[in-house]
Amino acid sequence: MAQPTQFELRHKNAQFANAVKSGKKAVKPSRQDQLSKRSPVSLWALGIVLFVVIGGGEYLARSCLLTN
């Protein structure tokens, strides 16, 4: 299959831009839309894992040993 020419690419892009401007929904949502729907739980989980790996686990272990 041959590659599309520059003219064909520009024509398709212009058609797509006109369709989106007229109200047709873009196929792929924008990055901002994707991030707004994302749950912050994954960021909390990552923070906890990093805390434990970097040295927070040692701090927590000492505090637990001192209380027992």
Image (spheres, helix red, strand yellow):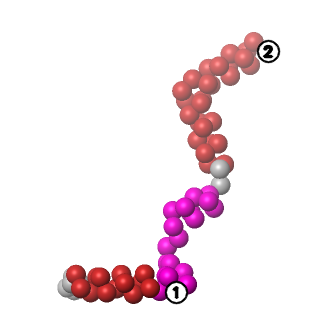
Residue 62 lies in the magenta-colored region: no
Magenta span covers which residues?
19-38
Q: Is residue 55 above or below residue 11?
A: above
Give the image location of residue 66, x and y in percent. 75, 12
Q: Is residue 25 magenta?
A: yes
Quadrant where the N terminus is found in the figure: bottom left
Q: Amino acid at mark 1?
A: Ser
Q: Depth check: 63 or 17 in front?
A: 17
Residue name at image x 51 percent, y 67 percent: 30
Q: Secondary structure at mark 1?
A: loop
Q: Quadrant of residue 35?
A: bottom right
Q: Which mark is residue 3?
A: none
Quadrant, the C terminus: top right
- Looking at the picture, which amino acid does disc 2 mark? Thr
Mark 2–mark 1 CB contact (< 8 Å): no
Of residue 39 and residue 12, the one placed in the foreground of this image is: 12
Q: Is 20 located above or below residue 53 in the figure? A: below
Residue 54 in the image: x percent, y percent? Answer: 54, 27
Task: Decide: few, some or many residues near mark 1? Use Cα within 10 Å; few <14, some 14-19, many ≥20.
Answer: few
Question: Which of pointers 2 and 1 lies earlier in the amino acid sequence?
Answer: 1
Give the mark toward the camera: 2 or 1.
1
**Nearer-the-camera pick, 13 or 2:** 13
* 40 over 51 or under it: above or below: below
User: Left or right: 28 with respect to 63?
Assistant: left
Look at mark 1 in the image and give the residue it sits on.
22
Disc 2 and disc 1: Cα gap in Å? 66 Å
Q: Secondary structure at mark 2?
A: helix
